[in-house]
Image: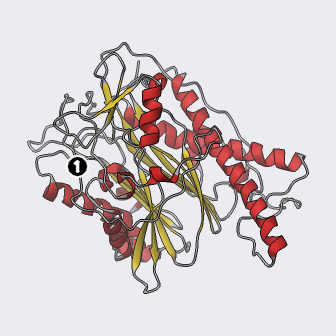
């Protein structure tokens, strides 16, 4: 988590709800010429206040038909991580997953707000894009069509380009609308609070992704020898990436690291040594939005293969102490799929104690999406010690008790930098899309630590975090 500290006066942030959205019967896959005769629940109007009652939507510790999720509070106050898996997102065989890591005094509220609102906004914009395609006489396109000859190959390439364009536009617009809502919210102060986001939508063999901040997505696949291989799908959006640093400096923001942690670059106001945000893109953090910090997501599209086994989304509390390869190995070797997310968080907690015994463990949140759509039986699930009651109890956000049995009081604290000793250089380069201006990004920007499993824990200096949730005045 990249917190921020500022002595400036606070300003309030985000407007009311997005209202109701009608979900389309088709979005970019197959043909839309025929209307579906049977409507699923997800095709009806979805209002934000009804989200907790929507079937196949999991946002607390537990499992779904194709995934398991787990979060554990660290030792720094209220859990500021949030997560969600939403199956049958717009139609059958479409799944939305997201992990959101909040920072700042109200980071937990920002992360939960983004968790609830961003998927609904994405639905709304996908429906709008699809409606425009239908009005223009075009059909929805599939990115998985077979290429039989040169002509078909060209047509399929054009179709895939249009498909990417639709989804990219939907991700860009939904992230922009989300940040706008946070800015104008009457009861949520986002001036020095914000959240990361790593979000994916899986439909068939297509995997669409948008992300900001330093929460990460990693793909676990089998190679030709049936050995597990980790492929990082996202780039940690840190201020020391050349593109990010150039933009921030062009907007009069400052990027530098302090002497006692030279590996951690941070974003500072032009006129004050605050807030020291350790990421270049985030929702909220409006004290820095005029100085180069943005909420424009990176977008990517990947066509999955039969060798791809699962996708892991996690907050930096996991990546600070475990490499991509270690995470993939832990998930792949879990005794049951239902327990994979919990076991991964437990492994991260042990690594925190072993590697950084004097540091306070960060919050951890994990989503494991299994790409073959299979999960354990309910009996196997219960054997792992999970029940619907115990699984959901850990997401309450109540502060952990300190070693003496007392609840920790909020305080300013200095956190240490976490760096892995060595990481492999054998990751494939990740295609990075434009920042919404249509300009491609140079491939050289990919050879950075964000692809090597190197991250940092939390911010250098942190505003007080509350031991219990309090209403924001």
Question: Percent position (x, y) of residue 65?
Answer: 54, 67
The crowding category of the residue bearing disc 1, from other C-alpha atoms within 10 Å (few below 14, some 14 to 19, many at least 20), is many
Which residue is the extreme one toward the bottom? 225
On-image quarter of the N terminus: top left
Foreground of the two, 10 or 427: 427
> In the shown orientation, is residue 202 left or right of residue 24?
left
Q: Residue furthest left?
A: 404
> Which residue is rendered at x = 45% and y = 80% of the image?
223
Please give left or right for residue 312 compared with residue 421 in the image: right
Task: Answer left or right for 141 relative to 441.
Answer: right
Q: Where residue 140 sits: x, y (%)? A: 80, 57
Is residue 465 visible in this depiction of the protein?
Answer: yes
Secondary structure beneath disc 1?
loop
Eyeballing the image, is 466 above or below 384? above
Q: Position of residue 459 (x, y in %)?
A: 28, 36
Image coords of residue 55 (percent x, y): 59, 55
Residue occupied by mark 1: 418
Can residue 27 be seen in this snapshot? no
Q: Residue at x 75, y 63 (%)?
A: 157
Give the quadrant of the C terminus.
top left
């Amino acid at each position: 988590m990249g917190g921020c500290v500022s002595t400036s006066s606070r300003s309030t942030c985000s407007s009311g709800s997005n209202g109701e959205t009608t979900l389309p019967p088709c979005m970019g896959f197959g043909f839309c010429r025929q209307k579906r005769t049977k409507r699923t629940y997800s095709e009806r109007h979805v209002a934000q206040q009804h989200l907790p009652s929507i079937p196949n939507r999991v946002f607390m510790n537990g499992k779904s038909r194709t995934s398991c999720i787990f979060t554990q509070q660290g030792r720094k106050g209220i859990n500021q991580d949030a997560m969600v898996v939403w199956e049958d997102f717009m139609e059958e065989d479409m799944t939305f997953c997201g992990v959101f890591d909040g920072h700042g005094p109200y980071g937990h509220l920002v992360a939960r707000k983004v968790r609830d609102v961003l998927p609904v906004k994405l639905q709304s914009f996908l429906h709008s894009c699809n409606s425009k395609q239908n009005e223009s006489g075009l059909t929805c396109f599939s990115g998985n069509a077979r290429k039989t000859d040169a002509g078909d190959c060209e047509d399929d390439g054009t179709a895939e380009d249009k498909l990417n364009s639709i989804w990219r536009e939907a991700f860009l617009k939904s992230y922009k609308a989300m940040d706008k809502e946070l800015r104008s919210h009457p009861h949520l102060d986002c001036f020095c609070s914000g959240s990361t986001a790593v979000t994916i939508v899986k439909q068939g063999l297509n995997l669409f992704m948008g992300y900001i901040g330093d929460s990460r997505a990693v793909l676990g696949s089998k190679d030709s020898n049936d050995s597990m291989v980790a492929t990082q799908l996202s780039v940690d959006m840190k201020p020391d990436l050349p593109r990010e640093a150039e933009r921030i400096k062009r907007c009069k923001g400052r990027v530098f690291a302090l002497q006692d942690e030279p590996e951690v670059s941070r974003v500072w106001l032009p006129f004050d040594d605050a807030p020291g945000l350790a990421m270049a893109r985030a929702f909220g953090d409006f004290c820095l939005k005029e100085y180069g910090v943005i909420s424009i997501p990176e977008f990517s599209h990947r066509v999955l293969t039969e060798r791809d086994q699962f996708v892991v989304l996690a907050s930096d509390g996991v990546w600070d102490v475990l490499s991509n390869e270690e995470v993939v190995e832990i998930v792949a070797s879990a005794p049951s799929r239902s327990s994979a997310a919990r076991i991964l968080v437990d492994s991260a907690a042990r690594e925190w104690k072993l590697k950084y015994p004097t540091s306070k463990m960060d919050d951890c949140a994990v989503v494991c999406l299994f790409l073959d759509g299979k999960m354990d039986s309910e009996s196997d699930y219960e054997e792992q010690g999970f029940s619907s009651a115990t699984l959901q109890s850990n997401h309450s956000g109540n502060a952990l008790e300190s070693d003496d049995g007392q609840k920790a009081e909020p305080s300013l604290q200095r956190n240490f930098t976490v760096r892995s000793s060595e990481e492999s250089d054998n990751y494939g380069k990740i295609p990075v899309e434009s920042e919404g201006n249509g300009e491609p990004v140079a491939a050289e920007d990919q050879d950075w630590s964000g692809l090597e499993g190197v991250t940092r824990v939390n911010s250098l200096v942190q505003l007080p975090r509350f031991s219990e949730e309090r209403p924001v005045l």
